[in-house]
Image (tube, rainbow, N blue to C red):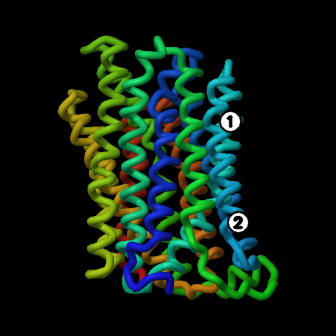
Protein backbone atom coordinates (compact mmCIF):
# COMPACT_ATOMS: atom_id res chain seq x y z
CA UNK A 1 0.00 0.00 0.00
CA UNK A 2 1.27 3.46 -0.92
CA UNK A 3 0.30 4.93 2.44
CA UNK A 4 -1.50 3.88 5.60
CA UNK A 5 -3.84 6.83 5.11
CA UNK A 6 -6.52 6.70 2.42
CA UNK A 7 -5.81 10.40 1.77
CA UNK A 8 -2.42 9.85 0.11
CA UNK A 9 -0.51 11.28 -2.83
CA UNK A 10 -2.47 9.31 -5.41
CA UNK A 11 -5.95 10.04 -4.02
CA UNK A 12 -5.11 13.75 -3.77
CA UNK A 13 -3.56 13.80 -7.27
CA UNK A 14 -6.55 12.03 -8.81
CA UNK A 15 -8.94 14.29 -6.90
CA UNK A 16 -7.20 17.45 -8.14
CA UNK A 17 -7.13 16.10 -11.71
CA UNK A 18 -10.87 15.48 -11.49
CA UNK A 19 -11.38 19.02 -10.18
CA UNK A 20 -9.45 20.66 -13.05
CA UNK A 21 -10.93 18.41 -15.75
CA UNK A 22 -14.46 19.06 -14.54
CA UNK A 23 -13.66 22.77 -14.30
CA UNK A 24 -12.79 22.60 -18.00
CA UNK A 25 -15.78 20.75 -19.39
CA UNK A 26 -18.38 22.16 -16.97
CA UNK A 27 -17.40 25.70 -18.05
CA UNK A 28 -18.33 24.61 -21.57
CA UNK A 29 -21.39 22.58 -20.51
CA UNK A 30 -22.92 25.51 -18.62
CA UNK A 31 -23.17 27.66 -21.75
CA UNK A 32 -23.71 24.81 -24.22
CA UNK A 33 -27.55 25.05 -24.25
CA UNK A 34 -27.37 28.83 -24.80
CA UNK A 35 -24.71 28.37 -27.51
CA UNK A 36 -26.89 25.78 -29.24
CA UNK A 37 -29.84 28.17 -29.01
CA UNK A 38 -27.84 30.70 -31.06
CA UNK A 39 -27.62 27.96 -33.70
CA UNK A 40 -31.40 27.37 -33.60
CA UNK A 41 -31.14 23.93 -31.99
CA UNK A 42 -34.11 22.22 -30.25
CA UNK A 43 -34.26 20.06 -27.10
CA UNK A 44 -34.13 16.86 -29.15
CA UNK A 45 -30.75 17.93 -30.60
CA UNK A 46 -29.36 18.62 -27.15
CA UNK A 47 -30.60 15.22 -26.00
CA UNK A 48 -29.04 13.59 -29.07
CA UNK A 49 -25.67 15.33 -28.54
CA UNK A 50 -25.53 14.28 -24.90
CA UNK A 51 -26.87 10.80 -25.57
CA UNK A 52 -24.64 9.90 -28.53
CA UNK A 53 -21.52 11.28 -26.82
CA UNK A 54 -22.35 9.33 -23.65
CA UNK A 55 -22.97 6.18 -25.69
CA UNK A 56 -19.63 6.40 -27.48
CA UNK A 57 -17.93 7.13 -24.18
CA UNK A 58 -19.50 4.07 -22.59
CA UNK A 59 -18.09 1.67 -25.18
CA UNK A 60 -14.67 3.31 -24.86
CA UNK A 61 -14.86 2.68 -21.11
CA UNK A 62 -15.48 -1.02 -21.56
CA UNK A 63 -12.68 -1.38 -24.11
CA UNK A 64 -10.28 0.61 -21.96
CA UNK A 65 -11.11 -1.42 -18.85
CA UNK A 66 -10.57 -4.72 -20.68
CA UNK A 67 -7.33 -3.59 -22.33
CA UNK A 68 -5.69 -1.90 -19.34
CA UNK A 69 -6.13 -4.90 -17.01
CA UNK A 70 -3.54 -6.51 -19.31
CA UNK A 71 -0.99 -3.70 -18.97
CA UNK A 72 1.74 -3.42 -16.38
CA UNK A 73 1.26 0.38 -16.33
CA UNK A 74 -2.17 1.93 -16.74
CA UNK A 75 -1.28 5.57 -16.11
CA UNK A 76 -0.18 6.58 -19.66
CA UNK A 77 -3.62 5.60 -20.97
CA UNK A 78 -5.26 7.89 -18.41
CA UNK A 79 -2.98 10.81 -19.36
CA UNK A 80 -3.87 10.41 -23.05
CA UNK A 81 -7.58 10.35 -22.20
CA UNK A 82 -7.35 13.61 -20.25
CA UNK A 83 -5.52 15.34 -23.13
CA UNK A 84 -8.12 14.25 -25.71
CA UNK A 85 -10.99 15.43 -23.47
CA UNK A 86 -9.38 18.86 -23.10
CA UNK A 87 -8.87 19.27 -26.85
CA UNK A 88 -12.37 18.07 -27.74
CA UNK A 89 -14.02 20.44 -25.27
CA UNK A 90 -12.07 23.46 -26.56
CA UNK A 91 -13.10 22.49 -30.11
CA UNK A 92 -16.73 23.55 -29.36
CA UNK A 93 -15.52 27.03 -30.28
CA UNK A 94 -14.99 25.91 -33.91
CA UNK A 95 -18.63 24.82 -34.34
CA UNK A 96 -20.99 26.60 -36.71
CA UNK A 97 -23.87 24.09 -36.56
CA UNK A 98 -25.19 21.32 -34.35
CA UNK A 99 -23.32 18.40 -35.91
CA UNK A 100 -20.00 20.15 -35.28
CA UNK A 101 -20.88 20.28 -31.58
CA UNK A 102 -21.88 16.61 -31.72
CA UNK A 103 -18.51 15.68 -33.25
CA UNK A 104 -16.48 17.71 -30.73
CA UNK A 105 -18.50 16.40 -27.76
CA UNK A 106 -18.07 12.84 -29.02
CA UNK A 107 -14.28 13.20 -29.28
CA UNK A 108 -14.11 14.76 -25.81
CA UNK A 109 -16.26 12.01 -24.32
CA UNK A 110 -14.27 9.25 -26.06
CA UNK A 111 -11.23 10.57 -24.22
CA UNK A 112 -13.25 10.67 -21.03
CA UNK A 113 -14.37 7.09 -21.63
CA UNK A 114 -10.81 5.83 -22.10
CA UNK A 115 -9.54 7.45 -18.90
CA UNK A 116 -12.44 6.68 -16.52
CA UNK A 117 -11.93 2.97 -15.66
CA UNK A 118 -8.16 3.52 -15.52
CA UNK A 119 -8.51 6.40 -13.05
CA UNK A 120 -10.87 4.37 -10.87
CA UNK A 121 -8.59 1.33 -10.92
CA UNK A 122 -5.60 3.50 -9.94
CA UNK A 123 -7.63 4.98 -7.10
CA UNK A 124 -8.89 1.61 -5.82
CA UNK A 125 -5.32 0.24 -5.86
CA UNK A 126 -4.04 3.09 -3.67
CA UNK A 127 -6.30 2.53 -0.63
CA UNK A 128 -7.46 -0.25 1.66
CA UNK A 129 -10.79 -1.92 0.84
CA UNK A 130 -12.30 -0.55 4.06
CA UNK A 131 -11.81 3.01 2.72
CA UNK A 132 -13.29 2.61 -0.78
CA UNK A 133 -16.30 4.77 0.09
CA UNK A 134 -14.21 7.66 1.40
CA UNK A 135 -11.70 7.49 -1.47
CA UNK A 136 -14.35 7.47 -4.18
CA UNK A 137 -16.46 10.00 -2.28
CA UNK A 138 -13.45 12.32 -2.04
CA UNK A 139 -12.75 11.98 -5.77
CA UNK A 140 -16.41 12.71 -6.57
CA UNK A 141 -16.36 15.71 -4.21
CA UNK A 142 -13.26 17.13 -5.90
CA UNK A 143 -14.73 16.43 -9.32
CA UNK A 144 -17.83 18.36 -8.34
CA UNK A 145 -15.88 21.26 -6.88
CA UNK A 146 -14.65 21.60 -10.45
CA UNK A 147 -18.27 21.53 -11.52
CA UNK A 148 -18.89 24.44 -9.11
CA UNK A 149 -15.92 26.47 -10.35
CA UNK A 150 -16.77 25.72 -14.00
CA UNK A 151 -20.24 27.35 -14.09
CA UNK A 152 -18.92 30.24 -11.95
CA UNK A 153 -16.15 30.73 -14.52
CA UNK A 154 -18.68 30.70 -17.35
CA UNK A 155 -20.94 33.24 -15.62
CA UNK A 156 -17.98 35.52 -14.83
CA UNK A 157 -16.14 35.37 -18.16
CA UNK A 158 -18.95 35.28 -20.71
CA UNK A 159 -19.94 38.96 -20.19
CA UNK A 160 -16.24 39.93 -20.24
CA UNK A 161 -15.94 38.19 -23.60
CA UNK A 162 -19.10 40.06 -24.77
CA UNK A 163 -20.92 36.72 -25.08
CA UNK A 164 -18.41 35.44 -27.64
CA UNK A 165 -18.69 31.72 -26.96
CA UNK A 166 -15.56 30.56 -28.89
CA UNK A 167 -13.35 32.65 -26.58
CA UNK A 168 -14.84 30.97 -23.52
CA UNK A 169 -14.43 27.51 -25.04
CA UNK A 170 -10.75 28.27 -25.76
CA UNK A 171 -10.16 29.13 -22.08
CA UNK A 172 -11.31 25.61 -21.07
CA UNK A 173 -8.10 24.21 -22.55
CA UNK A 174 -6.04 25.54 -19.61
CA UNK A 175 -7.63 23.57 -16.71
CA UNK A 176 -8.08 20.56 -19.01
CA UNK A 177 -4.36 20.27 -19.70
CA UNK A 178 -3.49 20.93 -16.04
CA UNK A 179 -5.59 17.85 -15.20
CA UNK A 180 -3.54 15.73 -17.61
CA UNK A 181 -0.34 17.02 -16.01
CA UNK A 182 -1.55 16.09 -12.52
CA UNK A 183 -2.19 12.49 -13.57
CA UNK A 184 1.23 12.35 -15.23
CA UNK A 185 3.28 13.82 -12.39
CA UNK A 186 1.30 13.64 -9.11
CA UNK A 187 -0.21 10.14 -9.28
CA UNK A 188 1.99 7.25 -8.18
CA UNK A 189 1.01 4.01 -9.85
CA UNK A 190 1.26 0.91 -7.69
CA UNK A 191 3.21 -1.96 -9.26
CA UNK A 192 0.95 -4.74 -10.45
CA UNK A 193 1.02 -7.98 -12.38
CA UNK A 194 -1.11 -7.75 -15.52
CA UNK A 195 -3.99 -10.19 -15.94
CA UNK A 196 -3.22 -13.06 -18.30
CA UNK A 197 -4.72 -12.55 -21.74
CA UNK A 198 -8.17 -14.09 -22.10
CA UNK A 199 -10.97 -13.41 -24.57
CA UNK A 200 -13.29 -10.47 -23.95
CA UNK A 201 -16.28 -12.75 -23.33
CA UNK A 202 -14.32 -14.79 -20.80
CA UNK A 203 -13.34 -11.57 -19.02
CA UNK A 204 -17.03 -10.80 -18.62
CA UNK A 205 -17.83 -14.30 -17.36
CA UNK A 206 -15.25 -14.20 -14.56
CA UNK A 207 -16.97 -11.16 -12.99
CA UNK A 208 -18.97 -12.29 -9.90
CA UNK A 209 -22.70 -12.99 -9.95
CA UNK A 210 -23.38 -10.41 -7.22
CA UNK A 211 -21.72 -7.77 -9.41
CA UNK A 212 -23.89 -8.76 -12.39
CA UNK A 213 -27.09 -8.45 -10.33
CA UNK A 214 -25.93 -5.04 -9.19
CA UNK A 215 -25.43 -4.04 -12.85
CA UNK A 216 -29.04 -4.88 -13.70
CA UNK A 217 -30.28 -2.37 -11.10
CA UNK A 218 -27.77 0.23 -12.31
CA UNK A 219 -28.88 -0.27 -15.92
CA UNK A 220 -32.57 0.09 -15.11
CA UNK A 221 -31.98 3.30 -13.20
CA UNK A 222 -29.61 4.61 -15.87
CA UNK A 223 -32.21 4.18 -18.60
CA UNK A 224 -34.12 7.06 -16.96
CA UNK A 225 -31.20 9.12 -15.63
CA UNK A 226 -30.92 11.89 -18.23
CA UNK A 227 -28.06 14.42 -18.57
CA UNK A 228 -28.73 17.42 -16.33
CA UNK A 229 -27.95 19.88 -19.10
CA UNK A 230 -31.63 19.25 -19.93
CA UNK A 231 -32.48 20.81 -16.55
CA UNK A 232 -30.61 23.96 -17.64
CA UNK A 233 -32.68 24.09 -20.83
CA UNK A 234 -35.90 23.45 -18.88
CA UNK A 235 -35.20 26.26 -16.43
CA UNK A 236 -34.21 28.63 -19.25
CA UNK A 237 -37.43 27.99 -21.16
CA UNK A 238 -39.86 28.01 -18.23
CA UNK A 239 -38.41 31.07 -16.50
CA UNK A 240 -38.12 33.16 -19.70
CA UNK A 241 -41.81 34.28 -19.77
CA UNK A 242 -41.41 35.73 -16.26
CA UNK A 243 -37.86 37.15 -16.31
CA UNK A 244 -37.01 37.49 -20.00
CA UNK A 245 -34.60 35.33 -22.01
CA UNK A 246 -31.37 36.94 -20.77
CA UNK A 247 -32.18 36.80 -17.06
CA UNK A 248 -33.63 33.31 -17.42
CA UNK A 249 -30.36 32.06 -18.97
CA UNK A 250 -28.38 33.69 -16.13
CA UNK A 251 -30.68 32.16 -13.49
CA UNK A 252 -30.38 28.74 -15.17
CA UNK A 253 -26.57 28.93 -15.07
CA UNK A 254 -26.75 29.95 -11.40
CA UNK A 255 -29.10 27.08 -10.65
CA UNK A 256 -26.67 24.65 -12.27
CA UNK A 257 -23.91 26.07 -10.10
CA UNK A 258 -26.14 25.48 -7.05
CA UNK A 259 -26.82 21.94 -8.31
CA UNK A 260 -23.10 21.24 -8.38
CA UNK A 261 -22.56 22.72 -4.90
CA UNK A 262 -25.17 20.27 -3.60
CA UNK A 263 -23.47 17.47 -5.56
CA UNK A 264 -20.07 18.27 -4.05
CA UNK A 265 -21.52 18.53 -0.54
CA UNK A 266 -23.24 15.14 -0.81
CA UNK A 267 -20.50 13.12 -2.54
CA UNK A 268 -17.98 12.81 0.30
CA UNK A 269 -20.73 12.46 2.92
CA UNK A 270 -22.25 9.63 0.88
CA UNK A 271 -18.83 7.98 0.55
CA UNK A 272 -18.25 8.17 4.30
CA UNK A 273 -21.70 6.70 4.98
CA UNK A 274 -21.01 3.94 2.45
CA UNK A 275 -18.06 2.78 4.61
CA UNK A 276 -20.32 2.59 7.67
CA UNK A 277 -23.70 1.22 6.46
CA UNK A 278 -25.31 -1.00 3.83
CA UNK A 279 -24.21 0.52 0.52
CA UNK A 280 -27.24 -0.90 -1.29
CA UNK A 281 -29.73 0.90 0.97
CA UNK A 282 -27.88 4.17 0.57
CA UNK A 283 -27.75 3.76 -3.21
CA UNK A 284 -31.48 2.94 -3.34
CA UNK A 285 -32.15 6.15 -1.41
CA UNK A 286 -30.19 8.11 -4.03
CA UNK A 287 -32.18 6.50 -6.85
CA UNK A 288 -35.43 7.35 -5.04
CA UNK A 289 -34.37 11.01 -4.84
CA UNK A 290 -34.06 11.00 -8.64
CA UNK A 291 -37.69 9.85 -8.87
CA UNK A 292 -38.65 12.63 -6.45
CA UNK A 293 -36.92 15.19 -8.68
CA UNK A 294 -38.88 13.99 -11.73
CA UNK A 295 -42.14 14.21 -9.80
CA UNK A 296 -41.26 17.74 -8.69
CA UNK A 297 -40.68 18.86 -12.28
CA UNK A 298 -44.14 17.57 -13.24
CA UNK A 299 -46.18 18.63 -10.22
CA UNK A 300 -44.65 21.86 -8.90
CA UNK A 301 -45.23 25.34 -10.42
CA UNK A 302 -42.35 26.71 -12.53
CA UNK A 303 -41.05 29.32 -10.09
CA UNK A 304 -37.44 30.17 -9.28
CA UNK A 305 -37.77 28.65 -5.79
CA UNK A 306 -39.19 25.47 -7.26
CA UNK A 307 -36.28 25.12 -9.63
CA UNK A 308 -33.84 25.72 -6.77
CA UNK A 309 -35.34 22.71 -4.96
CA UNK A 310 -35.30 20.58 -8.13
CA UNK A 311 -31.65 21.39 -8.88
CA UNK A 312 -30.69 20.75 -5.23
CA UNK A 313 -32.30 17.29 -5.18
CA UNK A 314 -30.67 16.55 -8.54
CA UNK A 315 -27.22 17.40 -7.21
CA UNK A 316 -27.66 15.43 -3.98
CA UNK A 317 -28.79 12.21 -5.65
CA UNK A 318 -25.95 12.28 -8.19
CA UNK A 319 -23.41 12.57 -5.36
CA UNK A 320 -24.94 9.56 -3.60
CA UNK A 321 -25.27 7.55 -6.79
CA UNK A 322 -21.72 8.00 -8.05
CA UNK A 323 -19.93 7.46 -4.73
CA UNK A 324 -21.96 4.35 -3.86
CA UNK A 325 -21.85 2.75 -7.31
CA UNK A 326 -18.07 3.03 -7.50
CA UNK A 327 -17.56 1.79 -3.94
CA UNK A 328 -19.87 -1.20 -4.51
CA UNK A 329 -18.12 -2.03 -7.78
CA UNK A 330 -14.69 -2.03 -6.10
CA UNK A 331 -16.02 -4.13 -3.22
CA UNK A 332 -17.75 -6.79 -5.33
CA UNK A 333 -14.84 -7.49 -7.72
CA UNK A 334 -11.25 -8.57 -7.02
CA UNK A 335 -8.42 -6.09 -7.54
CA UNK A 336 -7.01 -7.83 -10.61
CA UNK A 337 -10.23 -7.25 -12.57
CA UNK A 338 -11.03 -3.72 -11.39
CA UNK A 339 -10.34 -2.21 -14.81
CA UNK A 340 -12.87 -4.50 -16.49
CA UNK A 341 -15.41 -4.10 -13.69
CA UNK A 342 -15.25 -0.29 -13.73
CA UNK A 343 -15.34 -0.33 -17.53
CA UNK A 344 -18.48 -2.48 -17.63
CA UNK A 345 -20.15 -0.36 -14.93
CA UNK A 346 -19.34 2.81 -16.87
CA UNK A 347 -20.60 1.22 -20.09
CA UNK A 348 -23.92 0.30 -18.49
CA UNK A 349 -24.23 3.83 -17.12
CA UNK A 350 -23.22 5.36 -20.44
CA UNK A 351 -25.65 3.23 -22.44
CA UNK A 352 -28.37 4.28 -20.00
CA UNK A 353 -27.39 7.93 -20.39
CA UNK A 354 -27.48 7.62 -24.17
CA UNK A 355 -30.96 6.09 -24.09
CA UNK A 356 -32.39 8.31 -21.38
CA UNK A 357 -31.08 11.68 -22.62
CA UNK A 358 -32.32 10.99 -26.13
CA UNK A 359 -35.71 9.65 -25.01
CA UNK A 360 -36.33 12.43 -22.50
CA UNK A 361 -35.46 15.02 -25.16
CA UNK A 362 -37.69 13.24 -27.70
CA UNK A 363 -40.66 12.83 -25.31
CA UNK A 364 -40.32 16.47 -24.29
CA UNK A 365 -40.25 17.71 -27.89
CA UNK A 366 -42.86 15.33 -29.36
CA UNK A 367 -45.27 15.05 -26.42
CA UNK A 368 -44.86 17.00 -23.20
CA UNK A 369 -42.72 17.74 -20.16
CA UNK A 370 -44.80 15.38 -17.93
CA UNK A 371 -44.29 12.51 -20.41
CA UNK A 372 -40.52 13.08 -20.50
CA UNK A 373 -39.88 13.42 -16.78
CA UNK A 374 -42.56 10.92 -15.77
CA UNK A 375 -40.66 8.31 -17.78
CA UNK A 376 -37.48 9.24 -15.92
CA UNK A 377 -39.14 9.12 -12.49
CA UNK A 378 -40.71 5.70 -13.12
CA UNK A 379 -37.40 4.05 -14.08
CA UNK A 380 -35.58 5.72 -11.19
CA UNK A 381 -38.07 4.26 -8.73
CA UNK A 382 -37.86 0.84 -10.38
CA UNK A 383 -34.07 0.95 -10.09
CA UNK A 384 -34.32 1.82 -6.38
CA UNK A 385 -36.60 -1.16 -5.72
CA UNK A 386 -34.37 -3.53 -7.67
CA UNK A 387 -31.14 -2.49 -5.94
CA UNK A 388 -32.84 -3.15 -2.58
CA UNK A 389 -33.68 -6.67 -3.73
CA UNK A 390 -30.18 -7.44 -5.05
CA UNK A 391 -27.77 -9.37 -2.82
Task: Name the residue at the left extreme.
Answer: 305
Residue at the spot 42% in from the left edge and 46% down from the top edge: 146
Q: Earlier in the sequence, mark 2 or mark 1?
A: 2
Residue 107 x/y as whole percent: 70, 43
The residue lying at 55 percent from left, 84 percent from top is 333
Q: Secondary structure at mark 1?
A: helix
> Which residue is at 50% across, 63% downward?
14
Gap in angstroms between the C-alphas marked 2 and 1: 20 Å
- 10 Å crowding of disc 1: few (<14), some (14-19), many (20+): many
Does residue 220 lie above or below 233 as drawn? Answer: below
Residue 221 vs residue 143, the one in the foreground: 143
Q: Residue 99 in the image: state x and y as whole percent.
A: 70, 28
- Taking the spot 50% from the left edge, 35% from the top edge, the residue there is 29
Image mark for residue 104? 1
Residue assigned mark 2:
64
Q: Is residue 236 above or below residue 320?
A: above
For the residues bearing labels 2 and 1, Cβ distance under 8 angstroms: no
Kindly indicate the quadrant of the structure image that contains residue 304: top left
Mark 2: few/some/many CA within 10 Å (<14, 14-19, 20+): many
- The reply, left or right, for residue 276 in relation to residue 338 is left
Residue 287 image-quadrant placement: bottom left
Q: Secondary structure at mark 2?
A: helix
Amino acid sequence: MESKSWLNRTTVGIGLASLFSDWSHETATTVLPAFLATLGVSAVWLGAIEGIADGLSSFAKMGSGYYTDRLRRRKPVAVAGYVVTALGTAAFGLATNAWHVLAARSVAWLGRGVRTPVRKALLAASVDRSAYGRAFGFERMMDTLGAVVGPATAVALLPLFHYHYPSLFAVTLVPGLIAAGLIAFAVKEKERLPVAHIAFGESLRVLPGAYRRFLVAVGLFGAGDFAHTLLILLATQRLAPVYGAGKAATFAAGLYLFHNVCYAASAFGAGWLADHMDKRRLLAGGYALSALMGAGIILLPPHLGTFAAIFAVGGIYVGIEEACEDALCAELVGDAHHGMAFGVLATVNGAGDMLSSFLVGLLWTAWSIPAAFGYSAALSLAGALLVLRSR
